[in-house]
Amino acid sequence: MTSQKPKQPSTPHRPSQGNRDFRNRIKRGGKPTDRQKKGEQENIPRGAPQLQAGDATAQPCIILRAGREKSLLRRHPWVFSGAIERVDGAPLSGDTLPVRDAAGNFLAWAAYNQDSQITARVWSWREEEVIDAEFFRRRISTALEARRALLPRTRAGQGRGEGMNNGARLIHAESDGLPGLVVDQYGDTLVMQIGSAGAERWRDAIADILQELCNPACIYERSDSDSRGLEGLEPRNGVLRGALPESVEVVEHGLRFRVDVAAGQKTGFYLDQRDNRALTETLARDKDVLNCFCYTGGFSLYALRGGAKSALSIDASGDALRISEENLTRNGLDATRAEWQEADVFQALRKLRDQGRTFDFIILDPPKFAPTAAFAEKAARGYKDINLLGFKLLRPGGLLATYSCSGGISEDLFQKIIAGAALDAGVDAQIIHYLHASADHPVLLSFPEGAYLKGLVLRVAG
Ligand code: SAH
């Protein structure tokens, strides 16, 4: 078998304007550290891995070290640089190459990236499969069909979504067999995020297929996440197809939110919390609610619609708070029950404690403190800090809904951190809900890294 090299026209880059808050949100409100200024990520190996070149005249191919095929045999879709014995031929990043074990047996077709520690990401486990535009059409169609079945009211991928929900994650990267590709739908706007050299190579073909299958008014590209740097890819932010509507809106369980597709965080909205926000609505009646890391007001609006007595919402991003207030009026909710505060949550919680403020229901949905396990220890301190303060601000019998979207913090570890926080706060608590991302964010069973969002709702003793 030869390597599979599609010819794709390249597209001019546009500098990234967005995700600034997101990039810096691990820091505690102050100025970026020198490391952050340089865009460094602690403990994650950076730069091009040292790969052993093989026979430059041979067919391009990745040969693994003896015994290092095990994770691929378990269908984990990543090949780390350390598992590679040599790379034959002279492949370019983005090329599709066969991956072989030390004895030369075929394992997978994978997208090669010489600039990443994740040196190959698997497209297919079938030797006879050709990675071409038809391959992407099949994978994308499968992902869209699954959303239609999961979210029947969403009309996923069909453009001009109506009714109670018009937003969905249409493609969830590795877990949908499309490593490095995320596509979110907000009504008739699709936002695409590319985080791997392989998906980057097929970007235009993917956009054409999405245009054909979903017929959106706009496909917007938000390829400006931190992780692109680790892949050796430049940030990109701009319209890919059609024209961006003046205002993009997502409707979720009948609530309407403005989505800042060009400059908001991630692809503009956190669709993964949809079901957890709906649960919040059912728990909020007559409660004084504190929503920390509120972004554009998601949990607060649900709580207010659910009859909360008051909702104090805190976020470090002034832009997000301005959209929150707009969302409140957009939904005809009582603004006198809502208070918005632009602040660093770590400091704001201490201030509330010092002021003797207490609440019936506290929501903590912080940014990703630990993108990988290498950050776990530092992240654990951050989670413990805010949760300890959260427990202290709760009235007897109060509820704490606490989340982690860190891939580097397992569910088990998260629960242990929360248990430690409760202990130090001197409260007894019960878990009443174990929460995850909504069903349009599936997790491939062989790819546990896909299960990044975990949450607990706890009730403290009365
Ligand atoms: N709960 C939100 C999503 C939260 S995303 C929803 O349902 O849509 C995390 C949010 O934390 C972002 O809005 C970001 O601006 C904010 N943030 C990050 N670091 C912060 C800090 N130290 N203090 C306050 N807000 C912070």
Image: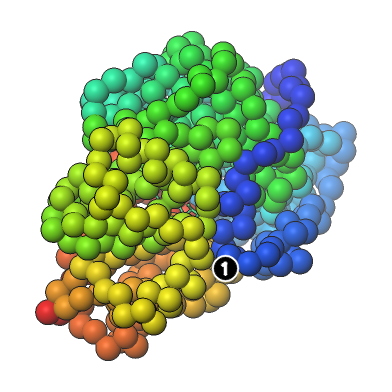
Mark 1 is on which residue type?
A: Arg
Residue 26 at x, y percent in the picture: 57, 63
Question: Could you tell me which quadrant the C terminus lies in?
Answer: bottom left
Towards the viewer: 107 or 290: 290
Residue 109 lies left or right of residue 75; in this view the side is right
Residue 309 at x, y percent in the picture: 18, 57
Towards the viewer: 424 or 289: 289
Q: Secondary structure at mark 1?
A: loop
Q: Look at the image and tell me whether residue 84 can be seen.
A: yes
Q: Is the CB atom of the residue marked by disc 1 within 8 angstroms of ligand 1's nearest atom?
A: yes
Residue at 22% across, 63% down = 288
Towards the viewer: 274 or 29: 29
Q: Name the outermost residue toward the front.
A: 336
Q: Which residue is mark 1?
A: 28
Q: Quadrant of residue 15?
A: top right
**Mark 1 burial class by Cα count in 10 Å: few <14, some 14-19, many 20+:** some
Residue at 43% across, 77% down = 350
